[in-house]
Every structure is written in structure tokens, then in C-alpha cells.
Image: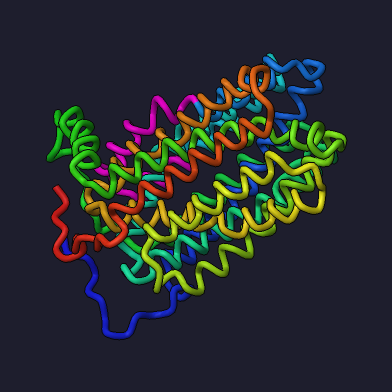
Amino acid sequence: MNRPEKSTTVPSLLSNRFLQTILFSSVLLQIGIWVRNFAILLYVAYRTNNDPYAISLISVAEFAPIFVFSFIGGTFADRWRPKRTMIWCDLLSAVSVFVVLLTIHFGSWHSVYLVAFISAILSQFSQPSSMRLFKFHVPEEQLQQGMALFQSLMAIFMVLGPMLGTFVYSTFGLEISIAIMGVVFLLSALVLIRLPEDTMGSQTVAAKGQFRKDFIEGFRYVWQSQVLRMLGLAFILAGLAVGVAQALNLFIVTEQLGKSKEFLQYLLMVNGAAMLIGGGIVAAFAKRVPPQLLLAIGMLAGAICTVIVGYSTSVPVTLTVQFLNGLVFPCIHIGISTMILKWSHTSIVGRVNGVLNPMFVGMMVISMSFAGALKDSFSLSTIYSGAGLLFLIGALAMVPIMNQKAPDLAPSVQEI
């Protein structure tokens, strides 16, 4: 099928009906996710008396589905109608939340883990479908600005989310918090009905019996593209660096800065506020900067800031560096998302996303798992220097592809 023809005058990004709808849906989903995250975290901590094993299972419930279902979800997202897929995923998430809520009310409290687990599974089908629609409905020259808007939205909830989640749980308790999540997922499904009509054909019938072939094709597509290969390497390096830094942030606060563990929230809030500002700045000049350069700038800044944080014993210095890091961090997210969209054919965006996304999350979880052992063997300064080196290598990986132009994949896309 043919992509909508571009007019000589590109309409304003915020007047795009698709973008308006998907942003509104994302706001609702972020509210549900943050309320869920903090309700489960605080409830499990209360029920288990801060048992580290029980609390770590929350992360397992959230991240494990990404390994198992990201490839599968990306493949199916390329075969199913994306609008319909997203609506059904939100509806099923809402239904599952209310079913689990009944289980919690009448049965075991351990069912709270299922809320995060089921939601994470369904998101692996919904998120790549959203990427397909994004590529189809947003003009090429506005892709980076669109990604910057999403980054700004994520940054807003990084600042407000913890406060919102804590307030809702403290005021209403677990069951009302979980119910709120179910309601906002239901509202999100209703909002998504407003998306432009789904004109991308379903591949389910024509490609019946070809799931394995489609699955492998996603890996082959990434491997055959030098840009996507380098992007995969950047994903791996960034995941390793971010994982170890996040896991040991608490020790930066208590050991390097000599503050109580509660001070960590201020580091996170400063970082989140800076990400919000940075997303707006990147949106303003995104058209004029290649996504490879954006990603390289973000990773280079991440390298410098990570090393400084590892050595700093001054609260003002650490807070300033955290702010600067947050200011530039949107370059990483926006650069990565834009490269995936620009270098992937519309018919395979879901699978490319399904191949690359687990690389980041997988490496992040692995490095978080080894963070404790590294802390026992090395100083924080050494560990953070190593994380900074990983960011630096990731930035250097962009050099060979810095001048490459995105292929023209827009005209005449035939959906199988």
C-alpha cells in the first residue's frame, strides 16, 4: 500500500491526529504504570519487611517478558493491524488487572507480581505496533521532533511519577491503586479508537505458517545493515553502563556524598527535570542534526558525567553533573528511536525493534546483577569509570556511520 503523499507544506507536528492521540494515550498509560510500580514496590516492601529477594522479583516480573516476548511481539506486530493490536493490548491489560485484583482481594497477595508480568507481556506487542504507526503517519522530517516529544513526556513522569505513585498508594492503598491502573488502561483503549483508520493490511492470512521465517528475517535485516549493527552495539554498551550505574546510585549517595538513602530521590528528580528541558531543546533543533550525531553526543556526555559522578564527593558538583547528564540524555533516546524508524522498512519496524530492544534491557539486567559483586571488588570511582568507558566506546561506534544517509523506504510500501 502507498504511504500518504507528502505535501509541499508539512503541517504542524502537534496538529497530527495520530500524534495527538498517541500522546494522550501515553499520558494515561504512564499514570497507570507509575501508580502500579510504586503500589507494588511499597506493598511488597511492607509485606516482606524489605526482603531484597521479594523486592527484586518485581524487576524480574517487569523485565523477564522483554527477553521472551520482545522478538515474538515484534514479529506479530508486523503481521497484525497495528491500531487493532494496540487497542486489544490495552483492553486485555485492563481485564487482566481486574482479574488479578479479584485474586488479591480473595486470595494471595503474591498475585501482585502478575499485574506487572502480564502488563509487560502485552506491551511487547503494543509498543512495536506504535512504532509502525509512528513511521507511517509522521512525515520523515518530523520523526526526530516526534521522538523528542515522547522523551519530554517520559521525563515529566520521571519527575512526577514517583510522587504520584507514592501519594495514591499512601492515600488509597493497594487495591484502589491497582484498580486505577485498570481504569486508565481501559481509557487508553478508548482513546486509541481515535487513531486514523488502520489501512496497513494484516499479514496473518497471507503469511500463515511463515512465523519462523519472519522471526529470522528480523535478525537478518539488522545484521545486514551497518547502521543497525552499530546501533545494536550502542544498545549493548549503553545497557551495561546504565545498569551498573543505576544499581549503585544509592551508594553514591551514602558513601560518596555521605547523605541518607532518602537523598537519592533528589538526584532522580534533578535528572528527570533536566531530561524534560533537554527533550524540549532537542525538539527545537532536531531537524538539523543527524540521529547518529545525536546519539554520539548523548553517549559522550554520558561518559564524562558518569566518571565525574563516580569521583565526586561534593553534593553541588554531583547535582550539577546529574542535571547536565539529564539535559543531554534525551539525545540517546531520540537518536536511537529515530535511527530505528529511518533505517527500517515499514513492514519490518516491529521486528527490528524486537531485536534491538532486548539488547539494551538484557545488558542492563546483567550489569545490575553483577553490580553487587563489582562493588565488593572495586571502588565506586573505578566502577563508574568503567561505565563511562562503555559510553565512550558506544559514542565512537557511531563514527563509521556518521555520514550515512537514511535509505528512501517511504514510497510504495507493499504490505504482504
The span picked out in magenta is: 64-90
- Which residue is rendered at x = 32% and y = 31% of the image? 72
Q: Is residue 3 above or below residue 154?
A: below
Asked whether, in this view, residue 392 is left or right of residue 152, the answer is: left
Can residue 73 be found in the magenta stretch?
Answer: yes
- What residue appears at the point 72 percent right and 46 percent down from the top-left corner? 268
* 231 in relation to 108, above or below: below
Q: Nearer the viewer, residue 28 or 392?
A: 392
Q: Is residue 39 visible?
A: yes
Q: Is residue 212 magenta?
A: no
Can you tell which quarter of the image residue 209 is in? top left
The number of numbered discs placed on residues in the rendered structure image is: 0
Please name the residue shown 22% across and 74% down the image: 5
- x%, y% of residue 51? 75, 15
- Magenta span main SS: helix
Which picture quadrant has residue 237?
Answer: top left
Regarding residue 84, the answer to whether it shows in the image is no
What percent of the width, then of the height, locates residue 414?
13, 55
Q: Position of residue 406 (x, y in %)?
A: 25, 61
Relative side of 292 to 54, left or right: left
Q: Position of residue 126 (x, y in %)?
A: 41, 43
Q: Quadrant of the N terminus?
A: bottom left
Q: Which residue is drawn at the image coordinates 44% and 40% (left, top)?
A: 89
Depth order, front residue of 100/366: 366
Q: Is residue 62 left or right of residue 226?
A: right
Q: Which color scheme did the rendering employ for the protein? A: rainbow
Q: Is residue 229 left or right of residue 385?
A: left
